[in-house]
């Protein structure tokens, strides 16, 4: 992402140079320019508790409503602006550019997950915190944020999720006694950690997964509203959903990522006449309970998701069975754990559950790094893999897998007509039959393809070919 941040920095530097020259050099409008700048500065602090500049950068996270401030949301907006404010224009109805843009989104999702792995990496987290503090006084909106920063920098444990650790060490609790009661100190520290990164715990990348999914799996027109979270009129304010889409029937839908905003969604629907949908993509990607890190999207998954020409439907709903379907590692290398992206999905021993960083409440419902399973030698998991490896059933090894980005809640937007399926009539050349097996038009497509091939062999003229197509459509 550094290349994008550098480009943004140049934009700000460019504007700053213009402002500096107009503010310092002699020109006919200098006095008026400086007077207007002074007025803007006064307007900025008309509400001294909430300067307008706090909406561009603010030092920490505290409270709710008009007096609250949330730095992670501002960091979030920068990345959304890069992808959805400007990068959105890159696609420009070009299939190759669309493929590149999708690949960019999926790689950014992986980067965000690596950022959030600071939850379980105290040494590198401390380096980040120390470097951030060097930004100066504006990094903290108020002294409490400075106290929280120092406490987080001194904390060597895990945070940001439901960990197996109980409470905080006394040293850290003592550092926080001046601003918070001991029983809520951990939550306060979690909140502050949240403020040093873009929305953590999947907040931003879940929104990006939904955007990817709409772009890749549907034929709707997509209007991202992640940067437009308030719609104003003369005398009213409306809170929109994360996305608006217009389907092929000219129906307007509002799409909210995740639940908890039913009231807001209801108000928007009643004021705009749109239908509201709520998406869910729980545990995709999942967090490994053993190490506490998120499990990244693997190269095969990204490759499949970007393969617009040969895999145009992307009707693969859930997973890749790594031992049998991976095109990067062979069967034996998968079993040896040479690929870092492989997940183990299944039960583990009580000993592993007790030692994991994340609390395991229902062991069979979790996904783990296979490399973590091998590292600790979990007996239950390894026995399960061995049993499936020697089984004669057609399913093979199902517990070693990796996931495609998946979203539920928008099934009605995924239904495509034949005219919207670019591979329709090309059944014989499809490389991956999974899409064909899931396509609503498989039998028609097979018939259509065969008849078109026969028609070409007997050299039917263009008029007759068109008539035949019309007859079969």
Image: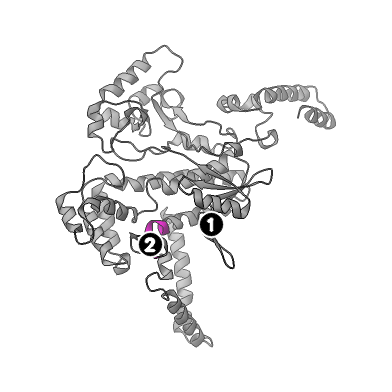
Image height of 232 relative to 248, above or below: below
Q: Is residue 286 left or right of residue 174?
A: right
| x then y, percent, for residue 1 | 42, 52
- Residue 436 vertical position relative to residue 139 in the rendered view, above or below: above
The residue under label 2 is 69
Q: Residue 256: where, in percent of width, then height?
A: 51, 47
Q: Is residue 205 above or below residue 15?
A: above
Horizontal and vertical percent for residue 253?
60, 47
Assign a secondary structure to mark 2: strand
Seen at 53% across and 41% down, the residue is: 213
Q: Picture quarter containing residue 313?
A: top right
In the displayed structure, 459 sits above or below 205; it is: above
Q: Is residue 396 visible?
A: yes
| Residue 241 falls inside the magenta stretch | no
- Tell me how far mark 1 sits from mark 2, CA to CA: 26 Å
Is residue 369 shown left or right of residue 224?
left
- Residue 4 in sight in this render: no
SS for callout 1: helix
Question: What main secondary structure does the magenta stretch of the protein show?
Answer: helix
* Residue at position x 41%, y 73% in the image: 47
Q: Which residues are magenta?
A: 67-75
């Amino acid at each position: 992402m550094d290349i994008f941040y550098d480009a943004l920095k140049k934009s700000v530097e460019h504007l700053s140079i213009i402002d500096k020259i107009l503010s310092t050099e002699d020109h006919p409008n200098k006095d008026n320019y400086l007077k207007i700048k002074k007025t803007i500065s006064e307007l900025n602090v008309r509400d001294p508790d909430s300067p307008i500049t706090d909406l561009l950068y603010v030092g920490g996270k505290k409270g709710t409503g008009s007096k609250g401030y949330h730095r992670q949301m501002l960091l979030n907006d920068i990345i959304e602006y890069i992808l959805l404010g400007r990068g959105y224009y890159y696609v420009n109805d070009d299939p190759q550019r669309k493929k590149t843009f999708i690949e960019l989104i999926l790689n950014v999702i992986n980067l965000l997950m690596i950022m959030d792995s600071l939850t379980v990496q105290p040494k590198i987290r401390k380096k980040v915190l120390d470097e951030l503090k060097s930004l100066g006084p504006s990094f903290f909106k108020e002294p409490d944020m400075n106290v929280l920063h120092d406490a987080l920098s001194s904390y060597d444990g895990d945070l940001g999720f439901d960990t197996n650790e109980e409470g905080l060490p006394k040293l850290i609790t003592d550092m926080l006694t001046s601003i918070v009661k001991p029983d809520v100190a951990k939550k306060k520290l979690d909140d502050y950690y949240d403020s040093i990164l873009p929305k953590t715990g999947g907040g931003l990348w879940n929104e990006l997964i939904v955007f990817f999914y709409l772009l890749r799996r549907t034929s709707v027109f997509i209007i991202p509203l992640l940067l437009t979270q308030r719609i104003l009129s003369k005398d009213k304010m409306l809170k929109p959903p994360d996305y608006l889409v217009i389907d092929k029937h000219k129906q307007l839908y509002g799409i909210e990522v995740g639940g908890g905003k039913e009231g807001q969604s209801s108000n928007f629907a009643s004021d705009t006449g749109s239908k509201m949908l709520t998406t869910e993509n729980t545990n995709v990607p999942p967090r490994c309970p053993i190490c506490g890190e998120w499990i990244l999207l693997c190269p095969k998954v990204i490759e499949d998701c970007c393969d617009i020409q040969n895999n145009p439907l992307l009707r693969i709903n859930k997973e890749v069975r790594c031992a049998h379907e991976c095109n990067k590692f062979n069967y034996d290398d998968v079993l040896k754990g040479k690929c870092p992206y492989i997940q183990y999905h299944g039960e583990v021993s009580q000993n592993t559950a007790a030692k994991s960083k994340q609390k395991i409440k229902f062991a069979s419902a979790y996904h783990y790094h296979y490399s973590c399973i091998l590292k600790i030698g979990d007996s239950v998991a390894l026995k399960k893999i061995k049993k499936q490896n020697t089984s004669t059933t057609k399913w093979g090894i199902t517990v070693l897998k990796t996931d495609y980005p998946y979203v539920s809640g928008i099934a009605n937007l995924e239904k495509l007509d034949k005219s919207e399926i670019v591979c329709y009539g090309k059944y014989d050349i499809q490389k991956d039959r999974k899409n064909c097996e899931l396509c609503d038009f498989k039998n028609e497509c097979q018939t259509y393809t065969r008849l078109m091939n026969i028609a070409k062999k007997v050299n039917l003229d263009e008029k007759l070919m068109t008539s035949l197509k019309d007859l079969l459509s």
